[in-house]
Amino acid sequence: MSEEPTDRELVERARGGERAAFALLFERYSNQLFGLLVVISGDRDVAADLTQESFMLAHERLDQLNDPEQFRAWLYQIARNRWRDVLRGRQGMQRAVERLGGHPLAGDADWSRIDPLAELAERDLVARTLADLRRCDREVLALRHYWQLSGAEIAELLNITPAAAQRRVNRAEERFRERYRELAGEEPHIS
């Protein structure tokens, strides 16, 4: 039974031109990245586009990755930067529409589309609660609870101190609990 190659091995092989190695990196991280981007953006279509774009940019810039063992964190940074580009574009478009006297563009996407097959009221309530949170709160909650990253890992991804990362997670969890209680009248289970 052979062990799966490490990210470092796959990155080095992909840098050497082995397409299958990058395909394995895509296979390893595409679903995780997509799920995270759905939580952050609130829109499955946007998340799918951003996932594809992020992997394309990662492939093009693979030689710029300093530490191949940090591929996942580096990929996340690429995706995060692309999401910021999308937001800047939306904000600019909304300002232009407002200046022209039109109606502002719709806000966040419909979070109920995150998992259209989910019939459980709890999932719907969690999705509605997340939709009501600020984007930065959704992001740290997704990093902590979806990707299950430690405070130190979140700090590294967001380029902040571990203490600041923990404060952000704590504040986001508290905001989540407060909004959840407002919507449901009970305490959610965040672990």
Image: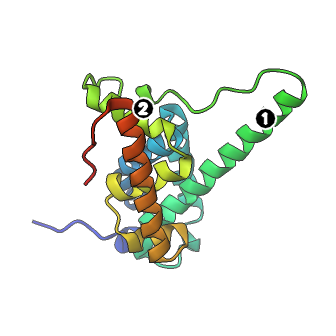
Give how far apart the Cα atoms at labels 2 and 1 are.
26 Å
Count of numbered circles in the view: 2
Q: Which residue is mark 2?
A: 128
Nearer-the-camera pick, 61 or 19: 61
Q: Horizontal and vertical percent for residue 117? A: 30, 23
| Residue 61 - label | none
Which residue extends farthest left?
A: 1
Nearer-the-camera pick, 39 or 135: 135
Q: Horizontal and vertical percent for residue 118? A: 28, 26
Disc number lying in front (2 or 1): 2
Give me the residue at 38% from left, 61% from top.
21
Characterize the local packing of mark 1: few (<14), some (14-19) or many (20 or more) Cα atoms within 10 angstroms.
some
Residue 24 in sight in this render: no
**What colouring style does the render use?**
rainbow
Compared with residue 50, is residue 115 higher up or lower down, i.e. above or below? Answer: above
Q: Is residue 78 left or right of residue 180?
A: right
The reply to whether callout 2 and callout 1 are in contact (CB within 8 Å) is: no
Which corner quadrant of the image does residue 159 belong to? bottom right
The amino acid sitting under disc 2 is Arg
Q: Which residue is mark 1?
A: 93
Q: Horizontal and vertical percent for residue 39? A: 44, 43
Give me the residue at 23% from left, 65% from top.
4
Residue 179 in sight in this render: yes
Which comes sooner in the sequence, label 2 or label 1?
1
Give me the residue at 36% from left, 58% from top.
144
* Quadrant in which the N terminus appears: bottom left
Nearer-the-camera pick, 6 or 114: 114
Characterize the local packing of mark 2: few (<14), some (14-19) or many (20 or more) Cα atoms within 10 angstroms.
some
Compared with residue 29, is residue 106 higher up or lower down, i.e. above or below? Answer: above
Give me the residue at 55% from left, 39% from top.
49
